[in-house]
Amino acid sequence: MKQLLSTLAFGLMITTSVAISAGEFKPLKGQTAVRVCADAYNLPYSNKQLEGFDNKIAAIIGEELGIPVEYYWFPQRIGFARNTLKKIDYEAGRFLCDMAMSIPASPGLYSPTTAYYSSIDAMVYRTGEGYELNKISDIAKVSNETKKLRIGLFDRATATNTLLENGLEDQIDYFQMMSGDVRENAGRIITDELATGNIDVAFVWGPIAAYYADHSDVDMTVVPLNEFSSDYIFNFSLGLRHQDKAWKELLNKILAKRKDDIASIIAEYNFPSLENVEPGTRKKRKVKDDDD
């Protein structure tokens, strides 16, 4: 009898283990689609043609759960969380969407999953103009010795203080991060300003710098601002509602299982290298949320 009970218990344990494994990535109860909140004009992250890296990563999540990916499109700027993830569609009796992407991996408006990529700001300039820029001080050197370089950056840019310390304040053109046209994003500083010669050097977030430099008809050089140390490397995650704990747990499991596939997708977009970054010397600054 003891042997029989032991055998039955062992069999039950194996069956339960298999059942848990088999059901690990099943959709949540009532979930029929991975419903993503995203910007329709925000490459390299997302667009309606699903060409962004976040579009491709969302497809991996849908694949793991065996359900389609659906999008609710809204410009990713002030009010994004309030008008997407946290807004209820009363006719459907549910929130408009259930997951935002490329959200700072620290608690705030969103409950973040584990991070799935990291990056840093970058300096971009036209290649083949007779000078080389490896750090911000090189701009001052070239300006003094060869050509006065015009610099473009958005308000609150990481590089601002260092540019001023190098005596370059009269060479800076400041641009507004969010234009009135929701079809435009920060990449315009490369396509509309740097490629056309209106400015000679642009400072912009790394993934954007790499994407628009790669897709420019004008040859560009992208230099990560590794001189600022690891304090200025930021991690990004999927952003969820704070109450959606089961959804967060499920997504974290998928991100862990498919981390190599996700890394391969990110690699296709040629993010600036994070090699040779000095260790941070202070507490990392808090990334401001994009909502009020």
Image: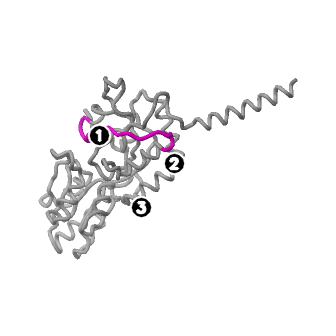
Neighbourhood count class around disc 2 (C-alpha, 10 Å): few under 14, some 14–19, many 20 upward: some
Label of residue 258 in the image: 2
205 is within the stretch colored magenta: no
Circle 1 SS class: strand
74 is within the stretch colored magenta: yes
Query: Real-space Cα distance between discs 1 and 3?
Result: 38 Å
Residue, disc 1: 73
Report which quarter residue 283 is drawn in: top left
Residue, disc 3: 276
Three-letter code for the amino acid on which mark 1 is drawn:
Trp
Three-letter code for the amino acid on which mark 2 is drawn:
Arg
Query: Which is in the foreground here, disc 3 or disc 2?
Result: 2
Q: Earlier in the sequence, mark 1 or mark 3?
A: 1
User: Residue 270: horizontal and vertical position, in percent?
Assistant: 38, 60
Query: Which is in the foreground here, disc 2 or disc 1?
Result: 1
Q: Are marks 2 and 1 in contact (CB under 8 Å)?
A: no
Q: Nearer the viewer, residue 208 or 137?
A: 208
Region rendered in magenta = 63-79
